[in-house]
Image (cartoon, rainbow, N blue to C red):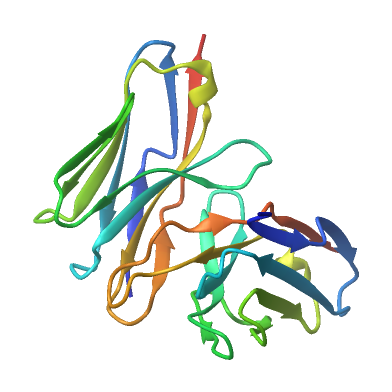
């Protein structure tokens, strides 16, 4: 089955700096890669996603890149703010009949004011 | 539109007791999932369902059973709770375009379970 590895597990940045979180996946059939943000005590919520036919996607201060050949994708947050502090999960899904999502182990991002 | 709801929010069980967690969604989603979240281990899939009356095992199904008798509900059962099942349980739902990949998963607020 699919295996998703996520790095780093913790990340501290100064407010205003950029943050990058990287994930690799194992199943070349995976074709949808969402990123979720989970604030303390809250549910995970989608912040951005990318499909396998796209190399990059941006939404204001966040962007995601995908390298299908290398089977890795990354989340980029620019001009970080204290409210960006949370745990971020990457995920990969294979629509080849299983219809389930495999999550990375999460990155705890701390933005220091 | 309540989205995805879970009951109960918190529960304490003694080893060997049984309980059922209820997940309900009002978005007419075909797919529903149960995850457990433990520190440092992310979200691990317990069981999932691709439609009413169907269920399938995920990554960590042992000790759990599920049922999807109605499209909007997905129940997670613990027949004989163990301390290793202490966790936060999240339900999620999603839809998929025909033959295509999954769309966004919408999560419930979570159920915190403590097994003593």
Q: Nearer the viewer, residue A95 or A8?
A: A95
**Residue at 33% over, 65% down:** A93
In this view, the residue farthest toward the left is A69
User: To which quarter of the image does residue A33 belong?
Assistant: bottom left
Q: Quadrant of the N terminus of chain A?
A: bottom left
Which percent across, then down, holds residue B64? 67, 81
Whether A65 is drawn above or below A111: the answer is: below
Which percent across, then down, holds residue B98? 31, 76
Q: Report the side of A38 relative to B17 (left or right).
A: left
Q: Report the side of A70 relative to A44 (left or right).
A: left
Whether B41 is drawn above or below A101: the answer is: above
Whether B45 is drawn above or below B41: the answer is: below
Which percent across, then down, holds residue B17? 88, 78
Q: How many numbered dots are placed on residues in this image?
A: 0
In this view, the residue farthest toward the front is B1
User: To which quarter of the image does residue B65 belong?
Assistant: bottom right
**Residue at 86% over, 61% down:** B11
User: To which quarter of the image does residue A38 belong?
Assistant: top right
**Residue at 88% over, 61% down:** B12
Which percent across, then down, holds residue A20? 31, 31
**Residue at 39% over, 75% down:** A99
Q: Nearer the viewer, residue B8 or B82?
A: B8
């Amino acid at each position: 089955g699919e295996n998703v590895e996520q790095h780093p597990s913790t990340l501290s940045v100064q407010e205003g700096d950029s943050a990058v979180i990287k994930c690799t996946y194992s199943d070349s059939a995976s074709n949808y890669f969402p990123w979720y943000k989970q604030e303390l005590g809250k549910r995970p919520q989608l912040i951005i996603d990318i499909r396998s036919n796209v190399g990059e996607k941006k939404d204001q201060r966040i962007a995601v890149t995908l390298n299908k050949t290398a089977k890795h994708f990354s989340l980029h947050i620019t001009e970080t703010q204290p409210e960006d502090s949370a745990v971020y999960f990457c995920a990969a899904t294979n629509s080849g009949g299983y219809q389930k999502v495999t999550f990375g182990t999460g990155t705890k991002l701390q933005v220091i004011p | 539109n309540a989205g995805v709801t879970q009951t109960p929010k918190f529960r304490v069980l003694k080893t060997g007791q049984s309980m059922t967690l209820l997940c309900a969604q009002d978005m007419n989603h075909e797919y529903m999932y149960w995850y457990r979240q433990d520190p440092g281990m992310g979200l691990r899939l317990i069981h999932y369902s691709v439609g009413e009356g169907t269920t399938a095992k995920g990554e960590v199904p042992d000790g759990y059973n599920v049922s999807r008798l109605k499209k909007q509900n997905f129940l997670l059962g613990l027949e004989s709770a163990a301390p290793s099942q202490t966790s936060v349980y999240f339900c999620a739902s999603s839809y998929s375009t025909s033959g295509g990949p999954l769309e966004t998963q919408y999560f419930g607020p979570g159920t915190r379970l403590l097994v003593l």
